[in-house]
Image (cartoon, grey):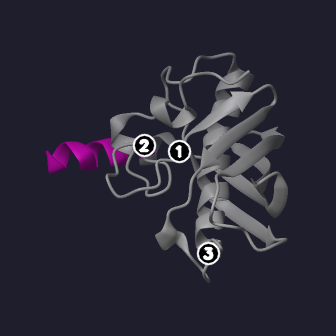
Amino acid sequence: MMTDKAFQDFYPDDTSHCYGCGRLNPHGLHIQSRWEGDESVCTFQPAPYHTAVPGYVYGGLIASLIDCHSTGTAAAAAYRQAGREMGSQPDFRFLTASLHVDYLKPTPINGPLEVRAVVKEIKGRKVVVSSSLFAGGVECARGELVAVQVPDEFMEKIRQDAADRE
């Protein structure tokens, strides 16, 4: 069973501007990821302008979905491992250190896409996430992402920069 609130809904305002998953980016994709048992799941409906060739999604969107879903999964997994509720302080935020995507089949644009991910490894500040993207139940892409926890000093810089802009 999936939870109601998405991982990305717990991100603090000062780190919620990502084009892929930032809820405060008015032009972004607004990716929403949730636990379903030990898997995380994200569903996304591509728009007509996400086209590579007529009828199919462009690869950059696929990579973005896998990227942001996986970093959200990394954060949620870190909270789980620490026995903490998402959103509790201090924040666990992750950035992509490495992303590898294999495009297995052309991805149709006419229906929702589903990304399913599992955590392969958590070691210190590093989380490895394996994802698959499906269209109509068919696996069209597969990815592996290495996420690293954002250092506290960088989080402080982000917060200070945000305060300076206000």
Q: Residue furthest left?
A: 166
Q: Position of residue 146 (x, y in %)?
A: 73, 55
Q: Which residue is identified by label 1? A: 151
Q: Quadrant of the C terminus?
A: top left
Residue closest to the eye, 69 or 15: 69
Residue 67 occupies which quadrant of the picture?
bottom right
Amino acid on which the number 3 mark rests in the picture: Tyr
Check disc 2 and report its element: helix, strand or loop: helix
Viewer-side label of 3, 2:
3
Mark nearer the viewer, 3 or 1: 3
Relative to 45, is 140 on the left or the right? Answer: right
* CB under 8 Å between discs 3 and 1: no
Would residue 103 be found to the left or right of residue 9 on screen?
Answer: right
Amino acid at pointer 2: Met
Secondary structure, mark 1, is loop
Residue at horizontal 46%, vertical 48%? 30
Q: Main secondary structure of the magenta part?
A: helix
Q: Residue at x 72, y 37 (%)?
A: 40
Crowdedness near tag 2: few (<14), some (14–19) or many (≥20) residues, C-alpha within 10 Å: some
**Mark 2 lies on residue:** 155
Span colored in magenta: 155-166
**How many residues crowd mark 1 within 10 Å: few (<14), some (14–19), many (20+)?**
few
Q: Amino acid at mark 1?
A: Pro
Q: Are marks 2 and 1 in contact (CB under 8 Å)?
A: yes
Q: CA distance from mark 3 to mark 2?
A: 32 Å
Horizontal side, residue 75 vs residue 36: left or right: left
Residue 45 lies, with reference to residue 74, above or below; the image says below
**Which quarter of the picture shows residue 79?**
top right
Q: Which residue, given by chain and number where applicable, does mark 3 sit on?
A: 58
Q: Is residue 60 above or below residue 113?
A: below
Report x, y in % for residue 100: 76, 67
